[in-house]
Amino acid sequence: MQKLKSVIFDVDGTMIDSLPFCIEAFRLAVEPIARRSFTAEEILSAFGPSDEGTIRVFVPDAVETCMEQFLYHYRRLHPIMCPKPFEGIVDILDWLKSRQIPIGLVTGKGPKSLAITLEILGLGHYFDAMETGSPLHANKPECLRSVLHKFGHSPSESLYIGDSPSDITACREVSIPIYSAAWAQMVDLPKLESLRPDKIVRSVAELKLLLQENLA
């Protein structure tokens, strides 16, 4: 990898351990209207589009109502189940800022849930460019291209850090290197290994060392 000029982060499972409370918020929003329960696996299988797109999979005729409930429970549960980022993430963001390295954010989350997370955790000021998910389809390749365009950097001059297998395939489509974050409690390590990202990083501390090497 050539010397990095920018770094782009995912959110859920990468900067914050949010999947457990996201799943719970979806359950509380859709189960009363769908009149059935959903497993964590069922909900995770609908991830890819934004929050609205995920809800549409389960209750296509009540998306607006369920979105209101989802955002209510998301805001309520966030400070209880996910009160801060992973230990060391803020240190990395501060270090990148001190080096004047542009920091991007590309997430499948919708803009409203992302705004709640950035507000509660106080992270919004770190990011020089942000792109969120689409309710229609998984759109990370387009989002990555948009952030790279804003930075004026080629894919090889940047790096994406994300935790999901779909992050790897999205980065391959754009030809941007990816470090797979493997420190969240719900990470699918065997699947990440099978897709052979540029590197699997098992701790935030390891990520900082790798970034320091590539930005030296």
Image (cartoon, rainbow, N blue to C red):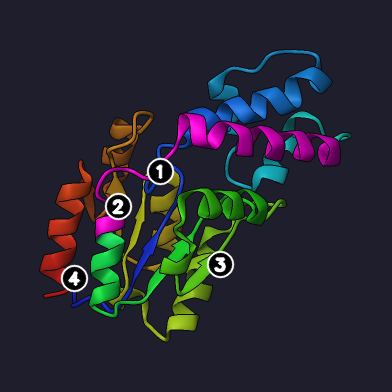
Label drawn at residue 1: 4
Of all residues, the one furthest to the top in this rendering is 36
User: Disc 2 to disc 1, how far (Cα)?
Assistant: 9 Å
Residue count near mark 1 (Cα–Cα under 10 Å), binned few <14, some 14–19, many ≥20: some
Q: Is residue 44 visible from the viewing direction of this image?
A: no
3D distance between C-alphas at marks 2 and 3: 25 Å
Task: Report which residue position mark 1 lands on.
Answer: 16
Tell me: residue 145, above or below residue 179.
below
Disc 2 or 1, which lies upstream in sequence?
1
Closer to viewer: mark 1 or mark 3: 1
Q: Which residue is at the front of the view, 191 or 126?
A: 126
For badge 2, the amino acid type reads Ile
Magenta region: 63-91
Q: Secondary structure at mark 4?
A: loop
The structure residue drawn at horizontal position 42% and vertical position 51%, both measured from the top left corner, is 167
Residue 1 left/right relative to 94: left
Residue 213: quadrant of the picture: bottom left
Query: 158 or 81: which is nearer to us?
Result: 81
**Which residue is identified by label 3?**
142
Residue displayed at 24% across by 56% down: 198
